[in-house]
Amino acid sequence: MPSTAPRHRIAPTTARRAAAITLLTLSTLAAGCVGGLDAIDAQTRRLLRQTSEGLGPSTRVPPREHPPAGDYERPDQADTSVLTDNPATDELEWLTAPEDRDVATRLTTYAEEAAGVGGEVRVISLEEAFRLSQISAREFLTAEESYILSAISVLIQRHLFSPRLFNDTSFFIDGDGENGRFDNVLSVVNDLRVTQRLPYGGDVEARWIWQATQNLRSSVSERYRQSSSIALDASIPLMRGAGNVARESLIQAERNLIYAARTFERFRRSLLVSIANDYFRLLERKAVIRNQIRQVESLETLEEATAARVEAGRLSEFQRNIVANQVLAGKSTLASLRESYILDLDRFKLRLGLDPTLPIDVTELTFSVPEPETNLVEATDQALSFRLDLQNARDQLSDARRDVTNARNDLLPDFDITGGVSVPTDPNDTQGGVLFDFDDTSYRAGVNIGLPLDRQIERLNVRQATIRLERALREFDRFRDDVVIDARSAVRSVDLARFSLNLAERQVEINRRRLEEQQLKEDTVDQQTLVDSENALLSAQNNRDAARTDLRNAVLDYLLTTGQLRVGPDGEFDALPGMTPGG
Protein backbone atom coordinates (compact mmCIF):
# COMPACT_ATOMS: atom_id res chain seq x y z
CA MET A 1 0.00 0.00 0.00
CA PRO A 2 1.59 3.31 -0.98
CA SER A 3 2.53 5.65 1.79
CA THR A 4 0.31 8.68 2.40
CA ALA A 5 2.96 10.54 4.44
CA PRO A 6 4.05 13.85 2.90
CA ARG A 7 7.33 13.76 0.98
CA HIS A 8 10.22 15.80 2.34
CA ARG A 9 12.01 17.87 -0.26
CA ILE A 10 14.18 20.95 -0.19
CA ALA A 11 13.01 24.04 -1.99
CA PRO A 12 14.92 24.55 -5.26
CA THR A 13 15.92 28.06 -4.22
CA THR A 14 17.52 26.82 -0.99
CA ALA A 15 19.30 23.95 -2.74
CA ARG A 16 20.74 26.22 -5.38
CA ARG A 17 21.98 28.75 -2.83
CA ALA A 18 23.46 26.07 -0.60
CA ALA A 19 25.22 24.48 -3.57
CA ALA A 20 26.59 27.84 -4.71
CA ILE A 21 27.94 28.67 -1.26
CA THR A 22 29.48 25.19 -0.92
CA LEU A 23 31.13 25.46 -4.34
CA LEU A 24 32.51 28.90 -3.52
CA THR A 25 33.92 27.67 -0.21
CA LEU A 26 35.56 24.59 -1.74
CA SER A 27 36.99 26.64 -4.63
CA THR A 28 38.51 29.16 -2.26
CA LEU A 29 40.00 26.37 -0.14
CA ALA A 30 41.51 24.62 -3.17
CA ALA A 31 42.98 27.85 -4.51
CA GLY A 32 44.53 28.69 -1.16
CA CYS A 33 46.10 25.24 -0.71
CA VAL A 34 47.38 24.71 -4.24
CA GLY A 35 47.99 28.02 -5.92
CA GLY A 36 49.34 30.14 -3.09
CA LEU A 37 52.94 28.92 -2.82
CA ASP A 38 54.11 30.66 -5.99
CA ALA A 39 52.80 33.98 -4.71
CA ILE A 40 54.46 33.39 -1.33
CA ASP A 41 57.80 32.63 -3.00
CA ALA A 42 57.51 35.83 -5.03
CA GLN A 43 56.75 37.89 -1.91
CA THR A 44 59.66 36.27 -0.08
CA ARG A 45 62.09 37.04 -2.91
CA ARG A 46 60.99 40.66 -3.03
CA LEU A 47 61.43 41.06 0.72
CA LEU A 48 64.84 39.36 0.66
CA ARG A 49 65.95 41.58 -2.21
CA GLN A 50 64.91 44.74 -0.38
CA THR A 51 66.66 43.67 2.83
CA SER A 52 69.88 42.46 1.19
CA GLU A 53 70.21 45.50 -1.02
CA GLY A 54 69.92 47.62 2.11
CA LEU A 55 73.27 46.21 3.28
CA GLY A 56 75.18 47.24 0.16
CA PRO A 57 75.81 46.26 -3.45
CA SER A 58 78.05 43.24 -2.77
CA THR A 59 75.40 41.24 -0.92
CA ARG A 60 73.67 38.13 -2.18
CA VAL A 61 69.92 37.61 -2.52
CA PRO A 62 68.95 33.92 -2.12
CA PRO A 63 68.00 32.93 -5.67
CA ARG A 64 66.77 29.41 -5.08
CA GLU A 65 63.42 28.20 -6.33
CA HIS A 66 61.54 26.01 -3.89
CA PRO A 67 59.84 22.84 -5.16
CA PRO A 68 56.07 22.57 -4.80
CA ALA A 69 54.73 20.61 -1.87
CA GLY A 70 53.64 17.80 -4.16
CA ASP A 71 57.26 16.95 -4.99
CA TYR A 72 57.91 15.71 -1.46
CA GLU A 73 57.23 12.09 -0.64
CA ARG A 74 54.39 11.77 1.82
CA PRO A 75 54.93 8.82 4.18
CA ASP A 76 52.11 6.80 5.59
CA GLN A 77 51.40 8.50 8.91
CA ALA A 78 49.93 5.28 10.32
CA ASP A 79 52.93 3.13 9.38
CA THR A 80 54.57 1.89 12.59
CA SER A 81 56.94 -0.59 10.95
CA VAL A 82 60.54 0.59 10.79
CA LEU A 83 62.90 -1.92 9.20
CA THR A 84 66.39 -2.44 10.60
CA ASP A 85 69.14 -4.12 8.61
CA ASN A 86 71.19 -5.94 11.26
CA PRO A 87 72.30 -9.41 10.06
CA ALA A 88 73.22 -12.10 12.54
CA THR A 89 76.84 -13.14 12.96
CA ASP A 90 76.50 -16.33 10.89
CA GLU A 91 75.06 -14.28 8.01
CA LEU A 92 78.19 -12.17 7.69
CA GLU A 93 81.45 -13.10 5.98
CA TRP A 94 85.02 -12.07 6.70
CA LEU A 95 87.88 -12.49 4.23
CA THR A 96 91.35 -12.41 5.74
CA ALA A 97 93.93 -10.57 3.64
CA PRO A 98 97.40 -12.10 3.33
CA GLU A 99 100.05 -10.22 5.24
CA ASP A 100 102.47 -10.41 2.31
CA ARG A 101 100.08 -8.66 -0.11
CA ASP A 102 101.49 -5.80 -2.18
CA VAL A 103 100.21 -2.94 -0.03
CA ALA A 104 102.61 -0.46 -1.59
CA THR A 105 101.00 -0.94 -4.98
CA ARG A 106 97.53 -0.68 -3.49
CA LEU A 107 98.42 2.57 -1.72
CA THR A 108 99.77 3.93 -4.98
CA THR A 109 96.53 2.92 -6.68
CA TYR A 110 94.50 4.78 -4.06
CA ALA A 111 96.53 7.91 -4.67
CA GLU A 112 96.20 7.58 -8.44
CA GLU A 113 92.44 7.07 -8.25
CA ALA A 114 92.07 10.15 -6.06
CA ALA A 115 94.17 12.13 -8.52
CA GLY A 116 92.23 10.76 -11.50
CA VAL A 117 95.29 9.32 -13.20
CA GLY A 118 94.27 7.90 -16.56
CA GLY A 119 90.86 9.58 -16.53
CA GLU A 120 89.15 12.95 -16.40
CA VAL A 121 90.04 15.18 -13.49
CA ARG A 122 88.10 18.25 -12.50
CA VAL A 123 90.62 20.97 -11.78
CA ILE A 124 89.25 23.46 -9.25
CA SER A 125 90.75 26.87 -8.76
CA LEU A 126 90.31 28.87 -5.60
CA GLU A 127 87.87 31.19 -7.38
CA GLU A 128 85.75 28.23 -8.46
CA ALA A 129 85.87 26.83 -4.93
CA PHE A 130 84.48 30.15 -3.68
CA ARG A 131 81.69 29.99 -6.23
CA LEU A 132 80.81 26.34 -5.53
CA SER A 133 80.78 26.91 -1.77
CA GLN A 134 77.97 29.45 -2.22
CA ILE A 135 75.95 27.28 -4.57
CA SER A 136 76.02 23.69 -3.35
CA ALA A 137 77.76 23.64 0.04
CA ARG A 138 75.40 22.19 2.64
CA GLU A 139 76.39 24.66 5.35
CA PHE A 140 75.74 27.55 2.98
CA LEU A 141 72.31 26.23 2.00
CA THR A 142 71.42 25.89 5.69
CA ALA A 143 72.49 29.48 6.40
CA GLU A 144 70.57 30.68 3.36
CA GLU A 145 67.45 28.89 4.55
CA SER A 146 67.72 30.54 7.97
CA TYR A 147 67.67 33.89 6.20
CA ILE A 148 64.66 32.85 4.12
CA LEU A 149 62.80 31.65 7.22
CA SER A 150 63.30 35.07 8.82
CA ALA A 151 61.75 36.69 5.76
CA ILE A 152 58.79 34.30 5.91
CA SER A 153 58.30 35.20 9.59
CA VAL A 154 58.04 38.87 8.59
CA LEU A 155 55.46 38.04 5.93
CA ILE A 156 53.43 36.15 8.54
CA GLN A 157 53.48 39.09 10.94
CA ARG A 158 52.65 41.58 8.19
CA HIS A 159 49.72 39.46 7.14
CA LEU A 160 48.42 39.40 10.71
CA PHE A 161 48.26 43.20 10.60
CA SER A 162 46.57 43.32 7.19
CA PRO A 163 42.86 42.82 6.40
CA ARG A 164 42.06 39.11 6.69
CA LEU A 165 39.03 37.61 4.97
CA PHE A 166 37.19 34.57 6.39
CA ASN A 167 34.10 32.68 5.32
CA ASP A 168 32.32 30.01 7.36
CA THR A 169 29.34 28.07 6.05
CA SER A 170 27.29 25.80 8.32
CA PHE A 171 24.58 23.29 7.38
CA PHE A 172 22.44 21.63 10.06
CA ILE A 173 19.02 20.08 10.56
CA ASP A 174 16.74 20.60 13.55
CA GLY A 175 13.92 18.19 14.36
CA ASP A 176 10.92 18.70 16.65
CA GLY A 177 8.66 15.67 17.25
CA GLU A 178 4.96 15.60 18.21
CA ASN A 179 2.76 12.44 18.26
CA GLY A 180 5.29 10.53 16.16
CA ARG A 181 5.47 13.22 13.53
CA PHE A 182 8.59 15.39 13.18
CA ASP A 183 8.99 18.87 11.87
CA ASN A 184 12.44 18.96 10.25
CA VAL A 185 14.08 22.28 9.48
CA LEU A 186 17.16 22.71 7.31
CA SER A 187 19.27 25.77 8.11
CA VAL A 188 22.14 27.27 6.18
CA VAL A 189 24.27 29.98 7.78
CA ASN A 190 27.07 31.76 5.95
CA ASP A 191 29.36 34.09 7.90
CA LEU A 192 31.58 36.28 5.71
CA ARG A 193 33.86 38.55 7.74
CA VAL A 194 36.97 40.66 7.42
CA THR A 195 39.18 41.47 10.40
CA GLN A 196 41.88 44.08 10.85
CA ARG A 197 44.36 44.35 13.71
CA LEU A 198 45.07 47.97 14.49
CA PRO A 199 48.75 49.02 14.60
CA TYR A 200 48.48 50.61 18.05
CA GLY A 201 46.20 48.08 19.69
CA GLY A 202 42.76 46.62 19.22
CA ASP A 203 40.97 45.21 16.22
CA VAL A 204 38.04 45.91 13.93
CA GLU A 205 35.78 43.31 12.36
CA ALA A 206 33.10 43.64 9.67
CA ARG A 207 30.66 40.74 9.12
CA TRP A 208 27.92 39.76 6.71
CA ILE A 209 25.79 36.95 8.11
CA TRP A 210 23.35 35.24 5.74
CA GLN A 211 20.87 32.70 7.11
CA ALA A 212 18.20 30.59 5.43
CA THR A 213 15.80 28.04 6.91
CA GLN A 214 13.48 25.58 5.16
CA ASN A 215 10.80 23.42 6.73
CA LEU A 216 11.28 20.03 5.10
CA ARG A 217 7.67 18.93 5.49
CA SER A 218 6.38 21.51 3.06
CA SER A 219 7.73 23.39 0.09
CA VAL A 220 5.29 26.28 0.21
CA SER A 221 6.84 29.70 0.32
CA GLU A 222 5.65 30.38 3.88
CA ARG A 223 7.91 27.61 5.11
CA TYR A 224 11.11 29.17 3.69
CA ARG A 225 12.78 32.13 5.40
CA GLN A 226 15.97 33.96 4.51
CA SER A 227 17.59 36.93 6.22
CA SER A 228 20.97 38.60 6.50
CA SER A 229 22.69 41.33 8.44
CA ILE A 230 25.88 43.36 8.36
CA ALA A 231 27.76 44.22 11.51
CA LEU A 232 30.81 46.23 12.47
CA ASP A 233 32.58 45.66 15.81
CA ALA A 234 35.66 47.29 17.29
CA SER A 235 37.70 47.03 20.48
CA ILE A 236 40.47 49.56 21.17
CA PRO A 237 42.68 49.61 24.28
CA LEU A 238 43.77 52.97 25.69
CA MET A 239 46.17 51.85 28.41
CA ARG A 240 47.29 48.24 28.77
CA GLY A 241 48.11 46.80 25.35
CA ALA A 242 47.98 50.18 23.63
CA GLY A 243 50.77 51.75 21.61
CA ASN A 244 53.78 50.10 20.01
CA VAL A 245 53.48 47.12 22.36
CA ALA A 246 50.51 46.00 20.27
CA ARG A 247 52.72 45.39 17.24
CA GLU A 248 55.75 44.11 19.10
CA SER A 249 55.69 40.84 17.18
CA LEU A 250 55.86 42.71 13.86
CA ILE A 251 58.55 45.12 15.09
CA GLN A 252 60.72 42.26 16.32
CA ALA A 253 60.20 40.23 13.14
CA GLU A 254 61.24 43.19 10.97
CA ARG A 255 64.35 43.75 13.09
CA ASN A 256 65.14 40.03 13.13
CA LEU A 257 65.10 40.04 9.34
CA ILE A 258 67.78 42.73 9.29
CA TYR A 259 69.77 40.74 11.83
CA ALA A 260 69.38 37.65 9.65
CA ALA A 261 70.58 39.55 6.57
CA ARG A 262 73.69 40.69 8.45
CA THR A 263 74.26 37.21 9.84
CA PHE A 264 73.92 35.69 6.39
CA GLU A 265 76.35 38.18 4.88
CA ARG A 266 78.79 37.61 7.74
CA PHE A 267 78.48 33.87 7.17
CA ARG A 268 79.26 34.27 3.47
CA ARG A 269 82.45 36.10 4.36
CA SER A 270 83.41 33.59 7.04
CA LEU A 271 82.73 30.76 4.61
CA LEU A 272 85.02 32.31 2.01
CA VAL A 273 87.81 32.53 4.56
CA SER A 274 87.20 28.98 5.74
CA ILE A 275 87.13 27.59 2.19
CA ALA A 276 90.33 29.50 1.43
CA ASN A 277 91.95 28.05 4.56
CA ASP A 278 91.06 24.53 3.42
CA TYR A 279 92.34 25.29 -0.07
CA PHE A 280 95.61 26.70 1.25
CA ARG A 281 96.06 23.61 3.43
CA LEU A 282 95.55 21.37 0.42
CA LEU A 283 98.21 23.32 -1.47
CA GLU A 284 100.48 22.99 1.55
CA ARG A 285 99.84 19.24 1.65
CA LYS A 286 100.81 18.97 -2.01
CA ALA A 287 103.97 20.96 -1.35
CA VAL A 288 104.88 18.75 1.62
CA ILE A 289 104.37 15.66 -0.54
CA ARG A 290 106.65 17.16 -3.19
CA ASN A 291 109.24 17.89 -0.52
CA GLN A 292 108.98 14.33 0.75
CA ILE A 293 109.31 12.89 -2.74
CA ARG A 294 112.41 15.02 -3.30
CA GLN A 295 113.94 13.77 -0.08
CA VAL A 296 113.15 10.11 -0.81
CA GLU A 297 114.68 10.40 -4.28
CA SER A 298 117.73 12.13 -2.86
CA LEU A 299 118.12 9.48 -0.16
CA GLU A 300 117.73 6.70 -2.71
CA THR A 301 120.54 8.25 -4.74
CA LEU A 302 122.61 8.48 -1.56
CA GLU A 303 121.79 4.85 -0.75
CA GLU A 304 123.04 3.69 -4.15
CA ALA A 305 126.26 5.69 -3.79
CA THR A 306 126.76 4.41 -0.25
CA ALA A 307 126.18 0.81 -1.36
CA ALA A 308 128.82 1.19 -4.06
CA ARG A 309 131.31 2.55 -1.55
CA VAL A 310 130.52 -0.28 0.85
CA GLU A 311 131.05 -2.83 -1.90
CA ALA A 312 134.36 -1.14 -2.67
CA GLY A 313 135.35 -1.41 0.98
CA ARG A 314 135.52 2.32 1.48
CA LEU A 315 132.67 2.40 4.03
CA SER A 316 131.37 0.08 6.71
CA GLU A 317 128.07 -1.78 6.33
CA PHE A 318 126.34 0.21 9.10
CA GLN A 319 126.77 3.38 7.01
CA ARG A 320 124.60 1.87 4.30
CA ASN A 321 122.07 0.73 6.91
CA ILE A 322 121.77 4.27 8.21
CA VAL A 323 120.77 5.53 4.76
CA ALA A 324 118.59 2.50 3.99
CA ASN A 325 116.69 2.98 7.26
CA GLN A 326 116.08 6.63 6.41
CA VAL A 327 114.80 5.69 2.94
CA LEU A 328 112.27 3.32 4.48
CA ALA A 329 111.17 5.96 6.98
CA GLY A 330 110.81 8.49 4.16
CA LYS A 331 108.64 6.14 2.11
CA SER A 332 106.44 5.43 5.13
CA THR A 333 106.02 9.14 5.75
CA LEU A 334 105.22 9.70 2.08
CA ALA A 335 102.47 7.07 2.17
CA SER A 336 100.96 8.67 5.27
CA LEU A 337 101.11 12.13 3.68
CA ARG A 338 99.35 10.89 0.55
CA GLU A 339 96.61 9.24 2.60
CA SER A 340 96.11 12.43 4.63
CA TYR A 341 95.92 14.44 1.43
CA ILE A 342 93.33 12.07 -0.07
CA LEU A 343 91.22 12.32 3.08
CA ASP A 344 91.45 16.12 3.13
CA LEU A 345 90.58 16.24 -0.56
CA ASP A 346 87.50 14.04 -0.01
CA ARG A 347 86.34 16.23 2.85
CA PHE A 348 86.88 19.31 0.72
CA LYS A 349 84.71 17.80 -2.02
CA LEU A 350 81.97 17.06 0.48
CA ARG A 351 82.15 20.58 1.83
CA LEU A 352 81.66 22.00 -1.67
CA GLY A 353 78.72 19.67 -2.23
CA LEU A 354 80.53 17.61 -4.88
CA ASP A 355 80.40 13.86 -5.47
CA PRO A 356 83.04 12.32 -3.16
CA THR A 357 84.01 9.86 -5.90
CA LEU A 358 84.72 12.64 -8.40
CA PRO A 359 88.48 13.02 -9.03
CA ILE A 360 89.52 16.63 -8.51
CA ASP A 361 92.72 18.57 -8.21
CA VAL A 362 93.52 21.98 -6.81
CA THR A 363 95.71 24.39 -8.71
CA GLU A 364 98.21 26.94 -7.56
CA LEU A 365 96.84 30.35 -6.74
CA THR A 366 96.02 32.71 -9.58
CA PHE A 367 95.73 35.71 -7.29
CA SER A 368 97.29 36.93 -4.09
CA VAL A 369 95.95 39.29 -1.46
CA PRO A 370 98.63 41.82 -0.49
CA GLU A 371 99.45 42.35 3.14
CA PRO A 372 97.79 45.40 4.72
CA GLU A 373 99.68 48.47 5.81
CA THR A 374 97.84 49.25 9.02
CA ASN A 375 98.23 49.70 12.76
CA LEU A 376 96.46 48.56 15.91
CA VAL A 377 94.33 51.70 16.33
CA GLU A 378 93.12 51.80 12.73
CA ALA A 379 92.26 48.09 12.70
CA THR A 380 90.35 48.43 15.97
CA ASP A 381 88.32 51.39 14.70
CA GLN A 382 87.44 49.54 11.50
CA ALA A 383 86.32 46.44 13.38
CA LEU A 384 84.15 48.46 15.76
CA SER A 385 82.53 50.25 12.83
CA PHE A 386 82.20 47.55 10.16
CA ARG A 387 81.65 44.23 11.95
CA LEU A 388 78.10 43.11 11.11
CA ASP A 389 77.85 40.78 14.09
CA LEU A 390 78.83 43.62 16.41
CA GLN A 391 76.15 45.81 14.83
CA ASN A 392 73.63 43.04 15.52
CA ALA A 393 74.71 42.84 19.15
CA ARG A 394 74.47 46.62 19.49
CA ASP A 395 70.99 46.79 17.97
CA GLN A 396 69.76 43.87 20.05
CA LEU A 397 70.31 46.01 23.13
CA SER A 398 67.39 48.10 21.88
CA ASP A 399 65.31 44.93 21.78
CA ALA A 400 66.17 44.22 25.41
CA ARG A 401 65.26 47.78 26.43
CA ARG A 402 62.00 47.52 24.51
CA ASP A 403 61.21 44.28 26.34
CA VAL A 404 61.43 46.18 29.64
CA THR A 405 59.06 48.86 28.33
CA ASN A 406 56.59 46.24 27.10
CA ALA A 407 56.74 44.38 30.39
CA ARG A 408 55.94 47.59 32.27
CA ASN A 409 52.97 48.16 29.98
CA ASP A 410 51.44 44.98 31.38
CA LEU A 411 51.32 46.63 34.82
CA LEU A 412 48.78 49.19 33.62
CA PRO A 413 45.05 48.76 34.19
CA ASP A 414 42.80 47.63 31.36
CA PHE A 415 40.86 50.48 29.79
CA ASP A 416 39.26 49.47 26.50
CA ILE A 417 36.66 51.14 24.33
CA THR A 418 34.30 48.73 22.60
CA GLY A 419 31.52 49.34 20.16
CA GLY A 420 29.51 47.87 17.36
CA VAL A 421 26.70 48.48 14.92
CA SER A 422 24.42 45.99 13.14
CA VAL A 423 22.03 46.47 10.23
CA PRO A 424 19.61 43.57 9.47
CA THR A 425 17.16 42.96 6.69
CA ASP A 426 13.45 43.48 7.38
CA PRO A 427 12.46 40.75 9.84
CA ASN A 428 8.91 40.73 8.40
CA ASP A 429 10.16 39.69 4.95
CA THR A 430 10.51 35.96 4.35
CA GLN A 431 13.28 36.62 1.81
CA GLY A 432 15.24 39.65 2.86
CA GLY A 433 18.06 39.26 0.33
CA VAL A 434 20.41 42.17 0.73
CA LEU A 435 17.75 44.81 1.25
CA PHE A 436 18.94 46.01 4.63
CA ASP A 437 16.51 47.94 6.79
CA PHE A 438 18.46 50.83 8.30
CA ASP A 439 15.44 51.73 10.42
CA ASP A 440 16.18 48.58 12.48
CA THR A 441 19.83 49.47 13.02
CA SER A 442 21.18 48.58 16.45
CA TYR A 443 24.37 49.74 18.08
CA ARG A 444 26.31 49.38 21.26
CA ALA A 445 29.20 51.26 22.88
CA GLY A 446 30.97 50.69 26.11
CA VAL A 447 34.06 50.92 28.20
CA ASN A 448 35.82 47.97 29.80
CA ILE A 449 37.85 48.77 32.90
CA GLY A 450 40.03 46.20 34.61
CA LEU A 451 41.75 47.26 37.82
CA PRO A 452 45.31 45.92 38.35
CA LEU A 453 44.46 44.08 41.55
CA ASP A 454 46.76 41.15 40.80
CA ARG A 455 49.83 42.02 38.77
CA GLN A 456 52.31 39.81 40.62
CA ILE A 457 53.23 37.79 37.54
CA GLU A 458 53.54 40.97 35.50
CA ARG A 459 55.86 42.50 38.11
CA LEU A 460 57.97 39.35 38.02
CA ASN A 461 58.09 39.65 34.23
CA VAL A 462 59.38 43.21 34.59
CA ARG A 463 62.10 42.01 36.92
CA GLN A 464 63.05 39.27 34.44
CA ALA A 465 63.20 41.78 31.59
CA THR A 466 65.45 44.16 33.56
CA ILE A 467 67.80 41.30 34.49
CA ARG A 468 67.95 40.20 30.85
CA LEU A 469 68.76 43.78 29.88
CA GLU A 470 71.62 43.96 32.37
CA ARG A 471 72.92 40.65 31.11
CA ALA A 472 72.67 41.85 27.50
CA LEU A 473 74.64 44.99 28.37
CA ARG A 474 77.42 42.91 29.92
CA GLU A 475 77.45 40.47 27.00
CA PHE A 476 77.70 43.34 24.55
CA ASP A 477 80.59 44.90 26.46
CA ARG A 478 82.36 41.53 26.48
CA PHE A 479 81.71 40.98 22.78
CA ARG A 480 82.93 44.47 21.91
CA ASP A 481 86.10 43.90 23.93
CA ASP A 482 86.60 40.56 22.17
CA VAL A 483 86.31 42.34 18.82
CA VAL A 484 88.97 44.80 19.90
CA ILE A 485 91.27 41.99 21.03
CA ASP A 486 90.67 40.03 17.83
CA ALA A 487 91.38 43.07 15.63
CA ARG A 488 94.64 43.83 17.41
CA SER A 489 95.62 40.17 17.29
CA ALA A 490 94.85 40.02 13.55
CA VAL A 491 97.28 42.86 12.87
CA ARG A 492 100.01 41.19 14.90
CA SER A 493 99.29 37.83 13.26
CA VAL A 494 99.95 39.26 9.80
CA ASP A 495 103.30 40.68 10.91
CA LEU A 496 104.20 37.49 12.77
CA ALA A 497 103.33 35.35 9.74
CA ARG A 498 105.47 37.55 7.48
CA PHE A 499 108.33 37.38 9.98
CA SER A 500 108.05 33.59 10.22
CA LEU A 501 107.97 33.23 6.43
CA ASN A 502 111.09 35.37 6.02
CA LEU A 503 112.95 33.27 8.57
CA ALA A 504 111.70 30.02 7.06
CA GLU A 505 112.87 31.03 3.58
CA ARG A 506 116.30 31.86 4.97
CA GLN A 507 116.40 28.50 6.75
CA VAL A 508 115.59 26.71 3.50
CA GLU A 509 118.43 28.51 1.75
CA ILE A 510 120.88 27.79 4.60
CA ASN A 511 120.02 24.09 4.76
CA ARG A 512 120.07 23.75 0.97
CA ARG A 513 123.60 25.21 0.81
CA ARG A 514 124.66 23.06 3.73
CA LEU A 515 123.49 19.89 1.99
CA GLU A 516 125.04 20.88 -1.34
CA GLU A 517 128.37 21.57 0.34
CA GLN A 518 128.32 18.22 2.13
CA GLN A 519 127.40 16.41 -1.08
CA LEU A 520 130.43 17.98 -2.77
CA LYS A 521 132.62 16.70 0.08
CA GLU A 522 130.93 13.33 0.20
CA ASP A 523 134.16 11.45 0.81
CA THR A 524 134.86 13.34 4.02
CA VAL A 525 131.32 13.41 5.43
CA ASP A 526 129.74 10.41 7.17
CA GLN A 527 126.34 9.16 6.10
CA GLN A 528 124.57 10.16 9.33
CA THR A 529 125.58 13.76 8.76
CA LEU A 530 124.19 13.64 5.22
CA VAL A 531 120.94 12.11 6.47
CA ASP A 532 120.64 14.79 9.15
CA SER A 533 121.15 17.47 6.53
CA GLU A 534 118.45 15.94 4.35
CA ASN A 535 116.06 15.93 7.28
CA ALA A 536 116.94 19.50 8.18
CA LEU A 537 116.28 20.67 4.63
CA LEU A 538 112.97 18.79 4.51
CA SER A 539 111.90 20.31 7.81
CA ALA A 540 112.86 23.80 6.64
CA GLN A 541 110.93 23.38 3.38
CA ASN A 542 107.85 22.15 5.24
CA ASN A 543 108.11 25.04 7.70
CA ARG A 544 108.38 27.48 4.81
CA ASP A 545 105.25 26.09 3.14
CA ALA A 546 103.37 26.18 6.45
CA ALA A 547 104.47 29.78 7.04
CA ARG A 548 103.27 30.75 3.58
CA THR A 549 99.89 29.21 4.34
CA ASP A 550 99.77 30.99 7.70
CA LEU A 551 100.45 34.33 6.02
CA ARG A 552 97.69 33.84 3.47
CA ASN A 553 95.26 32.87 6.22
CA ALA A 554 96.35 35.77 8.41
CA VAL A 555 95.60 38.34 5.71
CA LEU A 556 92.11 36.93 5.07
CA ASP A 557 91.45 36.65 8.80
CA TYR A 558 92.47 40.29 9.17
CA LEU A 559 89.96 41.32 6.50
CA LEU A 560 87.22 39.27 8.17
CA THR A 561 88.04 40.39 11.71
CA THR A 562 88.05 44.07 10.82
CA GLY A 563 84.85 43.80 8.75
CA GLN A 564 86.56 44.77 5.48
CA LEU A 565 86.15 41.48 3.63
CA ARG A 566 83.69 41.74 0.74
CA VAL A 567 82.17 38.83 -1.17
CA GLY A 568 80.45 39.28 -4.51
CA PRO A 569 76.95 37.94 -5.23
CA ASP A 570 78.39 34.81 -6.87
CA GLY A 571 80.82 34.12 -4.04
CA GLU A 572 83.87 35.70 -5.64
CA PHE A 573 86.43 37.63 -3.60
CA ASP A 574 85.68 41.33 -4.02
CA ALA A 575 89.01 43.15 -4.00
CA LEU A 576 89.24 46.47 -2.20
CA PRO A 577 90.72 49.55 -3.86
CA GLY A 578 94.50 49.26 -3.64
CA MET A 579 94.58 45.47 -3.90
CA THR A 580 96.05 43.89 -6.99
CA PRO A 581 94.69 40.33 -7.34
CA GLY A 582 96.21 38.39 -10.17
CA GLY A 583 99.80 38.87 -9.12
Image (cartoon, rainbow, N blue to C red):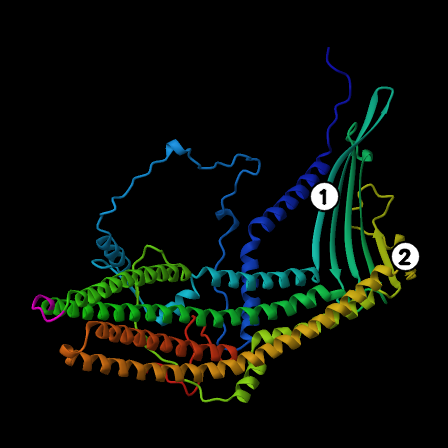
Q: How many marks?
A: 2
Q: Nearer the viewer, residue 475 or 513?
A: 513
Residue for badge 2: 444
- Is residue 472 shown in magenta? no
Q: What range is drawn magenta here?
A: 310-315
302 on left or right of 39: left
Q: Quadrant of residue 176?
A: top right
Residue for badge 1: 169
296 on left or right of 186: left
Quadrant into which the N terminus falls = top right
Report the amino acid beneath label 1. Thr
Q: Quadrant of residue 214?
A: top right
Q: Which mark is residue 217?
A: none
> Which residue occupies 73% across, 66% down?
248
Q: Earlier in the sequence, mark 2 or mark 1?
A: 1
- Is residue 313 shown in magenta? yes
Q: Main secondary structure of the magenta part?
A: loop
Instruction: Estimate the x, y position of residue 484 in percent, counting from the top left.
Output: 58, 81
Instruction: Estimate the x, y position of residue 61 in percent, counting from the top left.
Output: 50, 68
> Which residue occupies 41% across, 73% down?
572
Does residue 370 appear in the picture of this structure? no
> Which residue occupies 34% across, 81% down?
504
